[in-house]
Amino acid sequence: MSSDTIFALASGSARAAIAVMRLSGPASGSAIASLCQGRLPPPRVASFRRLRAPDGEVLDQALVLWFPGPATETGEDAAELHLHGSRPVIEAVSDLLVEAGLRPAEPGEFTKRAFLNGKIDLVQAEAVHDLVFAETEAQRRQAMRQMEGELGALYHDWSDRVRTILAFQEALIDFPDEDLPPEVEAQLLDTLSTVRSEIQAHLDDAQRGEKLREGLFFAITGAPNVGKSTLINALSQRDVAIVSDIPGTTRDALESRVILGGVPVTLVDTAGLRDTTDAIEAEGVRRARAKADAADLVICLVEAGGPAPDDLPATHLLVANKADLGAAGPDGALRVSAKTGLGMADLRARLAKVATDLTQAAGPPPLTRARHRAALLAAATHLDDAEQASLPELRGEDLRLAMRALGRITGAVSVDDILDVVFSAFCIGK
């Protein structure tokens, strides 16, 4: 439990009818009682109170909620003030809380205290951040599964099983003369192999969870004047790029964030691909090729009636623009007119399907962060080394290292070096 008490506006800084002020820490009760002139509300009951300054002046009429710890979100004494949302009211109440010895909370400090007090694990804490910043329904569902503990339960299960394996291994090391049954080591190795395979299967997920959380990148490429800028404007439903009949107008990569199939997608309009002696345009072409190489999908745009590129990779979608002019083909291309809207509904549906195929995951909740992936890769490596170890002492050490790697994900081992990184991305009041 922390010795100091924090407070923050949890409802945001914009003007609103109601502003929610959160408090957490040992002085929460006394601070509320002081504002209510000694009348502390009943626990967990929303009570109407007049909040007063020490001289008796009424600052606001508010709903006050008092939550004695440890059965609270943070594990500490906590309270909420539902104030009227004007800036003078918020500032006056904040000033009195500071005078009472409370301090403004740092970003993510409420959730950090919940983690440090054992209310949630580190995976759930990260899910709180993901839920607050979710842009789509699919991201909300993924964050909720993680926040409700499904992902953490999976990692805790692997850690518990590795701990059991290590216990058996220590028994084999400490009691070599006890004639332990040979099936003990056989069962140990079998369980070790099973856990390692499960972790590897979890890693081999094509980064679906991370892609959903961070969003996908779709690059639009093609020769000059095939309509790339018109297409990104049509898909974005706003003017992102300048449209001109002059070849080489787009010289840098222009980006637009859209939602396709419930997945955030960044569309990238690139410079026309052609040989050029213009240094600036040549740099744009180089950047266009780099964007295409890094994209989750490349929308390869050609003119209807024109030839298709040779050996189109599977990560490319061939789209024939200017279909309103009557030309056909090329074979296998999706015919559209970005200018008139012809075929655009079919293109959006195709792009939405690609987006969902790249991010949907069946079964256990997917990996959502590079931090998790790095720790799981380390755990899998240590388990593989343990399986191949020639000496029982070496196997025991590799098992300990694997267990520590798994513990770093959930915060079950010392994680002081990563806590500030995790919680610094949170908003104030969460």
Image (cartoon, grey):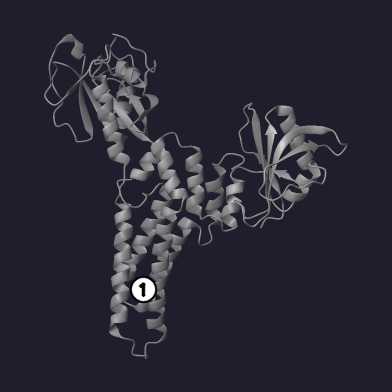
Give the residue at x 86% y 36%: 56
Give the residue at x 67% y 29%: 85
Residue 414, horizontal then vertical, whole percent: 54, 61
Q: Nearer the viewer, residue 393 or 427?
A: 427
252 to the left or right of 94: left
Give the residue at x 35% y 52%: 364
Q: Which residue is mark 1?
A: 395
Residue 172 in the image: above or below residue 46: below
**Quadrant of the frame with the C terminus:** top right
Residue 273 seen in the current view = no
Q: Nearer the viewer, residue 153 or 290?
A: 153
Secondary structure of residue under mark 1:
helix
User: What is the count of numbered marks?
Assistant: 1
Name the amino acid, label 1. Arg
Residue 296, horizontal then vertical, whole percent: 30, 35
Residue 299, horizontal then vertical, whole percent: 25, 27
Residue 335 seen in the current view = yes
Residue 10 position by quadrant: top right
38 to the left or right of 304: right
Residue 263 in the image: above or below residue 184: above
Residue 106 in the image: above or below residue 178: above
